[in-house]
Image (spheres, grey):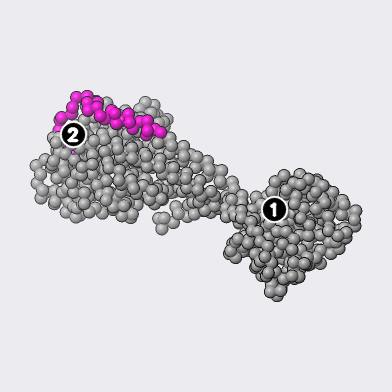
């Protein structure tokens, strides 16, 4: 159920893109036009008959054709309605009291509903000209049925009518029927449509000149009936408009009457009103299409925001990360070496698989330490394992289960030294980790230090994805934030604080589920500097399954949002809090919340572009983005001293892992907005990160 709402939202956005593509004739667009001369299957009487073909019902096996009666002219207009030309054509027809047939496309009908309503109100007859104007010869029966049905939905939605009159795109007179399009006529006829070809094709879309259009519209024989083809859309129809006046005047002078196809054949109008479900289904379809057309500029704007944020983040990283690396290479950047002992706090809840490895790694530390393990009401014998190890530098404190913040506060109160290192019970340190972590405290202005958390179990696909995320998304980001002086999170797996800084902000808080982000922001707002020590490496066991990964990231995302909201007042504060509020907090919100939430738009437009747009250009653009990601990842791996072979899985990570993170973040945002509560969720550990691994 946790995937239902986010995936439903993505599906709705994709549906809106497709609807918009349909309305603008971009989706499912097929520009192929068939050319055939074989007529072996077309009955001879149809080729020599009139322009109207009836293959409905019992006549499907033996279609018949009808001619327009003598001294009768039917004006027909294809491809509309057009907001520029259709109203002008309607004015000419109304001024001369002439009724005509308008063969409209569903795409144009949904975009200009007021014109369809005006055509019906003026007494003209509507015909179906498909939805997206493809040559039906190349389309499957399912696609033909869809083209017809969607157009009928559009007509029902905009004018409350259906039409039983049909004209195929790219059609001509009946003599042009061939072995390719004749089956289409029969298939459409079996679905109740009367097909109207033409007697006179003016070729007005070629803009041959007004005189040529008028001449082409005149009947082949004096007094013969004529079904005349003109266009009210598809380009500049000024010549059509000028020729229309002359065509009507000249034919009226010859004694012609003007009428519709149905009336010319002595039948009731093909345009009939609809009611009930068909009417409301059409209204819903048109409403959704209208929303889609209006939504696209918003989605495009949001896509631009995503691009701006991602490229802006990359640019900041490229500028600031090298500066941070250069500073880190200066070994005495902070002042005199820090050699005094420090306290290492290890809050532990049901960590029997990992706690021994954690303590053994601390035993190898090359910096003097005391270790306090705070057993937070474990039920799996974690405390017993600590006691059995009997390490002289380790103190065990037992307490009833109160959560990680409570355990850390207990440890802080028991700490013997002024510098406090915090780590998780599933993490192992390298021998130099503590020493590297506390060296920045040589600068008295520094109140906390973030270490370099690394994924230990990186050999699985999920582990490799998280490894890439940690190196690129966490550590490279942390370098950038360090240079800006606004590191928002000290990882719970490896971080250090001055006891004085912790005391001044009231210690660890359980107001949020991201106590590490909460305390980091609090220390920043209190005026302390926070820096990143890249060589202070800690190896942690990342979630090994999608279920565990979901649980962890859901808590992280939700907790981070809680922390941001808790410290929102910093935006209007003065001093250090104001600096973070007006610089750090917006960056964290933009890069950590807005950009990831909007990132799926990239994939939606990718999917839309591949299916309905220019696939080569779309795939090339997406490939360029992946190459940029790969270049940034390679650079991050190089700075961190990591072998880049795990980057082989980067394209799959972008398609799968990033979507999972989006769903997690969206679900967290929904929980936060709706006021839901999320409990701490303990992950199952395996203890496979047994010892420090050389990078």
> Residue 581 is drawn in which quadrant?
top left
Residue in the image at 45% along x and 54% along y: 7
Q: Is residue 447 left or right of residue 53?
A: left
Residue in the image at 44% along x and 42% along y: 624
Span of residues in magenta: 315-344
> Where 65 sits versus 314, above or below?
below
Residue 639 position within the rendered picture, expressed as x and y whole percent measured from the top left:
29, 36
> Where 426 sits versus 334, above or below?
below
Check disc 1 and report the residue beneath it.
Answer: 79
> Does any portion of residue 214 appear in the rendered image?
yes
Q: Which mark is residue 435?
A: 2
Residue in the image at 48% along x and 39% along y: 305
| Mark closer to the observer (1, 2) | 1
Residue 502 position within the rendered picture, expressed as x and y whole percent measured from the top left:
26, 34
Q: Split into 4 quadrants, where in the image is the C terminus?
A: top left
Identify which residue, 352 or 221, lies in the foreground.
Answer: 221
CB-based contact (under 8 Å), mark 1 and mark 2: no
Identify which residue, 174 or 455, lies in the foreground.
Answer: 174
Q: Earlier in the sequence, mark 1 or mark 2?
A: 1
> Residue 407 is drawn in which quadrant?
top left
> Does any portion of residue 159 appear in the rendered image?
no
Residue 201 position within the rendered picture, expressed as x and y whole percent measured from the top left:
76, 55
Q: Residues within 10 Å of mark 1 (few under 14, many from 20)?
A: many
> Residue 331 is drawn in which quadrant?
top left
């Amino acid at each position: 159920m946790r995937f239902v709402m986010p995936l439903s939202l993505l599906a709705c956005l994709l549906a809106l893109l497709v609807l918009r593509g349909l309305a603008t004739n971009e989706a499912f667009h097929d520009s192929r036009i068939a050319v055939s001369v074989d007529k072996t299957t077309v009955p001879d009487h149809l080729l020599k008959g009139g322009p109207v073909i009836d293959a409905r019902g019992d006549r499907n096996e033996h279609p018949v054709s009808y001619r327009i009666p003598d001294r009768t002219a039917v004006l027909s207009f294809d491809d509309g309605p057009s907001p520029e030309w259709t109203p002008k054509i309607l004015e000419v027809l109304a001024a001369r009291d002439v009724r005509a047939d308008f063969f409209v496309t569903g795409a144009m009908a949904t975009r200009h509903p007021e014109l369809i309503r005006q055509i019906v109100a003026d007494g003209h007859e509507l015909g179906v000209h498909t939805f997206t104007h493809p040559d039906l010869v190349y389309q499957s029966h399912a696609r033909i049925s869809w083209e017809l049905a969607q157009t009928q939905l559009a007509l029902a939605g905009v004018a409350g009518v259906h039409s039983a009159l049909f004209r195929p795109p790219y059609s001509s007179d009946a003599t042009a029927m061939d072995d390719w399009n004749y089956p289409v006529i029969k298939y459409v006829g079996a679905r109740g449509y009367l097909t109207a070809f033409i007697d006179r094709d003016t070729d007005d879309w070629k803009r041959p000149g007004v005189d040529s259009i008028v001449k082409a519209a005149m009947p082949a024989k004096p007094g013969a009936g004529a079904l005349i083809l003109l266009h009210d859309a598809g380009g500049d129809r000024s010549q059509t408009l000028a020729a229309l006046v002359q065509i009507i005047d000249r034919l009226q002078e010859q004694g012609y009457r003007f009428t519709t196809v149905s009336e010319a054949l002595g039948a009731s109008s093909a345009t009939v009103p609809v009611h009930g479900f068909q009417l409301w289904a059409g209204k819903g379809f048109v409403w959704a299409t209208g929303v889609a057309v209006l939504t696209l500029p918003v989605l495009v704007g949001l896509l631009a925001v995503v691009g701006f944020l991602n490229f802006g983040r990359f640019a900041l990283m490229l500028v600031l990360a090298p500066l941070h690396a250069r500073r880190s290479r200066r070994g005495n950047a902070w002042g005199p070496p820090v050699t005094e002992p420090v306290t290492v706090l290890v809050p532990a809840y049901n960590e029997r698989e990992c706690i021994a490895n954690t303590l053994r790694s601390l035993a190898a530390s090359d910096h003097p330490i005391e270790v306090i393990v705070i057993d937070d009401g474990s039920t799996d014998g974690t405390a017993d394992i600590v006691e059995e190890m009997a390490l002289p530098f380790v103190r065990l404190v037992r307490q009833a289960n109160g959560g990680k913040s409570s355990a850390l506060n207990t440890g802080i109160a028991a700490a013997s030294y002024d510098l406090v290192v915090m780590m998780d019970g599933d993490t192992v340190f390298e021998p130099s980790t503590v020493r590297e972590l506390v060296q920045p405290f040589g600068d008295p202005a520094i109140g906390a230090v973030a270490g370099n958390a690394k994924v230990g179990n990186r050999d699985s696909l999920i582990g490799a994805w998280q490894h890439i995320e940690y190196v690129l998304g966490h550590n490279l980001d942390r370098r950038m934030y360090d240079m800006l002086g606004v590191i928002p999170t000290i990882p719970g797996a490896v971080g250090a604080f001055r006891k004085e800084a912790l005391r001044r902000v009231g210690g660890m808080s359980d107001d949020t589920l991201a106590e590490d982000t909460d305390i980091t922001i609090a220390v920043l707002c209190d005026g302390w500097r926070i820096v990143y020590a890249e060589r202070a490496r800690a190896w942690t066991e990342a979630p090994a399954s999608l279920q565990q990964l979901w649980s962890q990231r859901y808590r992280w995302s939700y907790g981070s949002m809680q922390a941001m909201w808790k410290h929102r007042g910093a935006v209007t504060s003065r001093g250090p809090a104001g600096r973070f509020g007006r610089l750090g907090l917006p960056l964290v919100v933009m890069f950590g919340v807005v950009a990831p939430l909007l990132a799926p738009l990239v994939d939606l437009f990718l999917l839309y572009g591949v299916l309905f747009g220019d696939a080569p250009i779309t795939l090339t653009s997406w490939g360029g983005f992946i190459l940029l990601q790969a270049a940034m990842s390679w650079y991050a791996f190089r700075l961190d001293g990591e072998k880049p072979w795990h980057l082989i899985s980067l394209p799959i990570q972008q398609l799968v892992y990033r979507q999972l993170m989006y769903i997690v973040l969206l679900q967290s945002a929904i929980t936060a907005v709706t006021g839901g509560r999320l409990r701490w969720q303990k992950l199952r550990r395996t203890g496979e990160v047994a010892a420090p691994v050389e990078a």
